[in-house]
Image: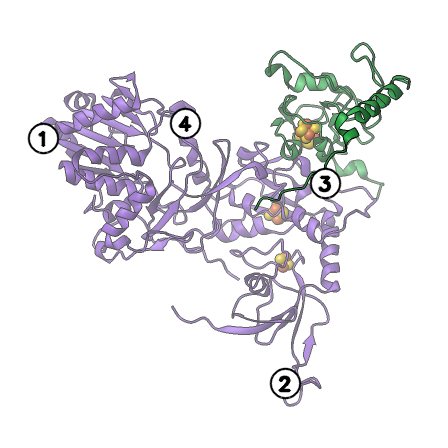
Amino acid sequence: MEEKQRVNINVNGGEYSVEAGQNVLEACRGIGVEIPYFCYHPSLKVAGSCRMCLVSIGMPARDRATGALLKNEDGTAQIAWAPKLSIACGTKVAEGMHIVTDSDAVKSCRQSVLEFLLLNHPLDCPICDKAGECKLQEYTHAYGRENSRYVERKNVKPKHVDVMGKIMLDSERCIECSRCIRFCEEFIGRSIFGFVKRGSRTEIAVYPGGDNDSNYLLNVVDGCPVGALTEKAFRFKMRPWFLKVTDGICAESSAGVNTRVWSRNGEIYRVTPRRNDEVNGMFMSDSGRYVHLRFNDANRLRQPRIDSTSCDLGYAVSRCMEILKLGKVAIVANGWQTLEEMFVLGELSKACGAEVYMVSHLGEDDGKLVSADRTPNMRGAFVTGLLKDYPPADLSLLAQKIDSGEIATVLCLRENLMGLGLTPGHFKAAHIIYCGSLENPTSASAKICIPLRSEFEKEGMWINRQWRVQKFSKAVDAPDGIADDSRFLLSLLGEYTSSSWSDTSVRSIREAMVSRITMLSGCADVGPNGVLIDSSSFAGIEFPEGKAYHFKGQE
Amino acid sequence: MAIVVERKRLSWLERTYLPQIVSGLYITLKNFFKPKVTLEYPDQYTSLPAGYRGAPTLVKDSQGREKCVSCQLCEFVCPSKAIKVVPGEISADSEYAYIEKAPSSFTIDMARCIFCGMCEEACPERAIVLQTEFSLNGLSRSELLRDKRSLYAAGGILPDKIMKWKKVKDNSELEGSH
Ligand code: SF4
Ligand code: SF4
Ligand code: SF4
Ligand code: FES
């Protein structure tokens, strides 16, 4: 990587060396000096409209005639301060720049900006879903006045406006930062929001008529610094301060969008993007936010079953082993297994001589954050050696082998065999063991059903379309009676191999995997940004995804 | 290391314990002739001082509107986790639709409540108020679980000067006021 240029700046009297090319706001954030801001967004163009980020900026003074730097009597550089405050978001750092963020002028500016913003604000925090994560609230606490001097009547603006059935718009809360406008124009590529009216009556509005929907619309909710745009699905569900946040990876596609999963008492309330500039920036798709709804009460597999009769988990697992021991085993899996599970599956297939059939799930590549491969970890199957070629979307080969009697037992993980080429006749001809989180036609007619955890109920790693290994953590506990995936797979493996796994945690599988697979040697402890692995050995394989999308945003 | 404290040797008179018994009886006798300060509760009752913190209740405004907007601040602040609020939405055709939010369920576990008054202090709507009821008992724990209905029944009405829900809905109503 090329060495980034650096400049020396002085912030509140302290000397710092920072990366050149960034704005004052980011540079100060980098050295731990907070500058409050509303309209600035790291991924969007600078609008400079809120004026919350005003600071004093000065440059070393030069002699007009000679251009030489002027010195004070004590030999220090003379600073020519800008006569008025400047916006930190719209000013780039430069060599010798002096910045003051804590002077009385700066403080009074912040206070006045907040006072103006609150003039017509409805002050309805108790009923606002943004409360607790609202910039206006936080800054008013930190920099604002404690009382209001406004005695006139407040403006009335449209409230309770539905935007494409996804968002609730409350214009009275809007502070006219234009982030939502810029996001739609720059990221979605279409104008969806806009300002109407003027002055203190300015309102945010949606373009009448036209196609205002997009699979990325909900990002404006995360971006809105106040509660003007709130998510309808999360409306009045829970206050954010009750929610526990865990780091997740979106299972929607191989894009591997980094997420935050917000839960309370085992219930997931919402999923929002987590910033990873290498993968998804600060955004995610709307559909990805609702992936957790796949695992709802109605379609959850909760009980182990043998021949459609509920039974004890231990008994189901032992029956499972008996059947597998009969031989002629095929393992069916897909890209929803974690890397660790794939590793164990690989060992298992080697140990019992089973053939592995993977199934691909393809969709349309939207060119942004939903890729064509709709499983999160197909590349993991290549790395763990389960796959040599990109798999087909059906199992006609497996069906033939069952017909010819080559396969007598199918261990199916999280896949719906019916509809992939297998018919009820195949379910009679072979023993089908279904292991998964959801009820489906396969679970309805499988010989044995083992309930497994969903990706929100376990930890693991996935490899996204960039060959980036990313880790996700467990957000909620699995319902009672559901098998621990890693323990289940290891107990199957333990039947065949002498290697005993005293520790059945995901972590211990990960350690074994990392030491066994050289490609993953750097992945024992992947950080929040993930680890890119060397994929050159898979260069010949044709993957369905388009180029990984990088939204850089323009300054 | 243990420290050995030397005990004072008691004198002969002290060892008889008679001075102690006599002085104790003297105190008893003195109080015997003083006026009584105790109350024959529950047969007798006294008025409670202002600001007394009894059981928390939910109150309505003078229109009979529920004031709570289910902001869950009381639930958050409650040190004994006695409060459970499930937020809900006021339907758009309601007279109070402007308020938008109201609890769909609200329970206080009186077996957990320690009458600290933090909920009343945290409430931005003055909707939860500790009143004078202090004798809370039941035959089971669930009897001490108060739901929205019983909380409102116990709370009654607390008039409010501001009628937020009556807010002007349109700028034209304001014409001339600028
Ligand atoms: S709705 Fe939100 S994001 Fe859009 S301009 Fe208003 S405050 Fe900014
Ligand atoms: S009085 Fe204290 S303990 Fe009782 S409900 Fe209120 S906050 Fe909780
Ligand atoms: S009683 Fe008050 S603090 Fe508690 S939820 Fe209702 S409005 Fe909020
Ligand atoms: S952040 Fe709004 S003007 Fe700089």
Q: Label 1 is placed on what type of residue?
A: Glu
Report whether mark 1 lies on the same chain as mark 2. yes
Tell me the distance, in whole angstroms, between the alpha carbons under discs 2 and 3. 51 Å
Q: Position of residue B98 (x, y in %)?
A: 70, 30
In the picture, the disc for residue A312 is none
- Foreground: disc 4 or disc 1: 4
Q: Hey, which residue is sitting farthest top in the picture? A: B43
Q: Earlier in the sequence, mark 3 or mark 4?
A: 3
Of the numbered discs in the image, which one, if any, rests on residue A406? 1
Q: Which marked residue is nearer to the observer: mark 3 or mark 4?
A: 4
| Residue for badge 4 | A479
The numbered mark, 4 or 1, whose residue comes first in the sequence reads 1
Q: Which label's residue is closer to the chain start, 2 or 4?
A: 2
Q: Would you identify the image quadrant in which residue A27 lies?
A: bottom right
The answer to whether residue A214 is seen in the rendering is no
In this view, A293 is above or below A96: above
Q: Which residue is mark 3?
A: A122
Pointer 4 residue Cβ closer than 8 Å to ligand 3: no
Chain letter for the residue marked with disc 4 in the picture? A
Q: What is the spatial separation of the Cα atoms under label 3 and label 4, in whole angstroms?
A: 42 Å
Visible residue check, residue A67: yes
Question: Chain B's colour?
Answer: green
Query: Which dot, 1 or 3, sits closer to the camera?
Result: 1
Who's the residue at 65% across and 57% down the image? A49
Q: Which element is circle 3 on?
A: loop
